[in-house]
Amino acid sequence: MDLHVKLPGLNLKNPIIPASGCFGFGREFAELYDLSLLGGIAIKSATPQKRFGNPTPRVAETPSGMLNAIGLQNPGVDVILEKELPWLAQFDTEIIANVAGASEEEYVEVIEKLNASQVVKAYELNISCPNVKHGGIGLGTTPELAAKVTKMAKAAANKPVYVKLSPNVTNIVEIAKAVEEAGADGLVMINTMMGMRLDLHTGKPILANVTGGLSGPAIKPVAIRMVYQVAQAVNIPIIGVGGITRAEDVLEFLYAGASAVEVGMQNFIDPYCCVKIIEELPKVLETYGVNSLQEAVGRSFK
Ligand code: ORO
């Protein structure tokens, strides 16, 4: 079965993309399998300067998920341009650059630099990181701020801009509509849900950052609900993300209205999960009588 998906700026050979932050720049995974098997790769967030991230501990296990408070650790956009992107160029897969910053101006600064790269095919505007004091989720929880940074990013970008939305909002539909109106070419949803855990001995938070972002199968029903609501309200494509562990989950996201998906936490449990899902997907589509990916997209409300 043909698994190709064409989205703004992205010619995906299949709809499976490892999610930003769960795949680094792919180097560790390239030791295990050929990254050209992937539809695309959403690389770790780029910020203007190198970031060490938050103090440790910065991950904690939860039932059917995990909490993270990494704090946008990355080597900075210049090193990403000089070292990571030229290395990624050897693979036949679509590279999506996740862009972050402490202010709207920093997002623009990162985009202006990444515009020079032939390797990056699209931007993923991260206005949903729950683990930083400035920028991140702070720009993604009101329609006005989300629209402002989207507009600025679009004016600076020479490639399509996808906006990664936060689930930590009351009305995700109004935020999605605001970024669509501001010129977004697509949406990626959802980022992690804010949560925390406490140590039973000390009574204190396990994460040094106190709170973190919850990901994994625990959040899949929330992601499905949000994709379902937003897909009926916008006319731009959605890349679904949240708790995908197997090909059946991909089909559920397609039914909800996503055109492609990102796979996050499962890469930590099974580093081969993306290739396994790609292999399984045609069989699962056949099992449920689906003849093409396009036919499945939005079936829940069409
Ligand atoms: N963590 C998340 O859960 N989402 C992000 O977008 C970024 C981080 C992080 O770097 O802490």
Image (cartoon, grey):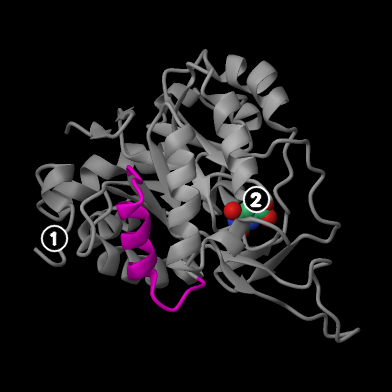
- Contact? badges 1 and 2 (CB < 8 Å): no
Mark 1 or 2 closer to N-term?
A: 2
Place of residue 207 in the rendered image (x, y in percent of width and height, measured from the top left): 79, 68
Residue neighbourhood size for the residue with mark 1, other residues' Cα within 10 Å, grouped as few (<14), some (14–19), many (≥20): some
Nearer to us in this view, 155 or 99: 155
Q: Tell me the number on the disc at residue 299.
A: 1
Distance Cα–Cα, label 1 vs label 2: 38 Å
Ligand 1 image position (quadrant): bottom right
Nearer to us in this view, 111 or 222: 111
Q: Quadrant of the C terminus?
A: bottom left
Pointer 2 residue Cβ closer than 8 Å to ligand 1: no
Q: Quadrant of residue 44?
A: top right
Mark 2 element type: loop
Q: Amino acid at mark 1?
A: Arg
Q: Tell me the number on the disc at residue 103.
A: 2
Q: Is residue 270 left or right of residue 67?
A: left
* Magenta residues, start to end: 168-185
Q: Does the segment drawn in magenta span residue 173? A: yes
Place of residue 69 in the rendered image (x, y in percent of width and height, measured from the top left): 72, 60
Residue 159 in sight here: yes
Place of residue 250 in the rendered image (x, y in percent of width and height, measured from the top left): 32, 52
Write the residue at 48% across / 16% down: 118
